[in-house]
Amino acid sequence: MVNRWLDISLFELMHTLEQLRSGALAGTRRLDLSCGLQSLPAEVFDLANTLEVLNLSGNQLRTLPHDLTRLHRLKVIFCSDNPFTVLPEVLGDCAALQVAGFKANRISEVPGAALPRALRWLILTDNAITRLPPELGQRPALQKLMLAGNQLRNLPHGLADAHRLELLRVAANQLTRLPDWLTALPRLSWLALAGNPLGWRHPAPEPLGNVPWEQLRVQGLLGEGASGHIYRVQRADRNEELALKLFKGAITSDGLPEHELAACLAAGQHPSLCTPSAELAGHPQGTRGLLLPLIPSSHTNLAGPPSLDSCTRDVYPIGLRIPAATVLRVACGMADAVAHLHQRGVLHGDLYAHNILWNPDTGDALLSDFGAATVLPLEQPATCHALQALEVRAFGCLLEELLAYAEPVAGRAVALGDVATLASACLHATPAARPTMAEVAVSIKRCMDFGDAGKMHA
């Protein structure tokens, strides 16, 4: 859901040139202009004392003015869907700039001078980049780096010094090997790298079976993600209601839909996973699709996606409190689900609360959205273990968040304390020192059982 926010919601409340030129936007902190611009309107600089977010996506810009630095409070700039071919060097002179998004341009060159010193989040998805500058590793605040859909053959060694990097998207590139330093990064937790010619062999997934388009009756749109639309459908031959995901076929911030499909098939079935039961066959436009269980209306997203400020951490509802027993139940289900994925050689890549659908009353939870997933080479156990250790840290972040919203109850305090100790182990700065997800799942189950026993004797 992070990607949908980046791809879509930026365009929901666009301003107009007339508003800008009339002075109606005086004092605004965010400006959204998408009106065929070929240059930045001079009136933008009238907002220099307040403007923090500038969204210029969907224009015809090729350059940015050399005096962009006059926007001295600018923290965020989005220039997706423009014909830039070079990342503008003036960005590097913007002292307050933390987030830069240049998705779906024509960028083939990224000068080191274009990287702001305060950079936290860089989006260069769907361009034509073949190499990155070593200076990328010299940006100490860098947390999030989105590079899917380029032509990278390697990653700069300087990134080994990016000790705060937590999310990396390099799916659908031309990487032929993974650098050794990648799996040693102390905070890397969310990684997508499917669709690179790494020479990995994967066993053929168990066939799901097909459902013809003619047997489905579409009843309405349930939602939209970065990679596709999800519809409520009825299967006529069984009188059964299901969810149908139709893939858009375009690259997303995570990678390509075909990689999501492959990961879903490799994942198989698990009671805490939202995985497909069948593939779609015979769509009139040849669109690929998956049939999934219909999520009960009692389920909702555990959290919202990261904000521009939180960057890599989810945003939970204000005032949320979760009973300790529910925390344990959610943690237990998710640990078991991720352990199942790892055993099947699947790295989820986006293990976040915003991808968890839960019932707040019961604690029943489902892990969804395989858009960033990677199918790992099971014949290379050392590689699998090293990459899975990164996702163990993501689970540690989830535990940390759940505990922050936990409502202690008599008889459960010791169990929650044990979960906190486990979270610390999952967050260990040395990835090789972290427990495996199989070990985590066993430990969480023990905490849950101990909590139940403690409540009985309280």
Image (cartoon, grey):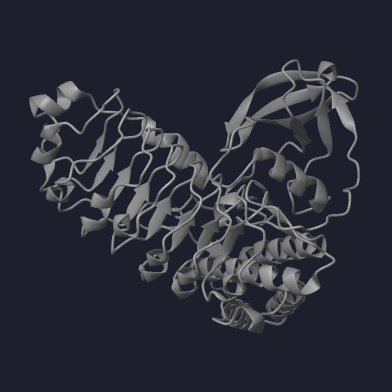
Q: The C terminus appears in which quarter of the rendering?
A: bottom right
The residue located at (31%, 35%) in the rendering is: 62
Identify whether 277 is placed above or below 176: above
Is 168 in front, or is 297?
168
The residue located at (78%, 33%) in the rendering is: 291
Q: Is residue 308 visible?
A: yes
Q: Quadrant of residue 452?
A: bottom right
Is 231 in front, or is 417?
231
Is 447 in front, or is 437?
437
The residue located at (77%, 45%) in the rendering is: 262
Residue 66 in the image: state x and y as whole percent: 17, 45
Q: Is residue 296 visible?
A: no
Residue 289 in the image: state x and y as whole percent: 74, 31
Decide if residue 29 is on the left or right side of residue 128: left
Decide if residue 237 is on the left or right side of residue 42: right
Residue 52 in the image: state x and y as whole percent: 22, 48
Q: Quadrant of residue 385?
A: bottom right
Residue 325 in the image: state x and y as whole percent: 64, 67
Identify whether 419 is placed above or below 251: below
The residue located at (53%, 71%) in the rendering is: 400
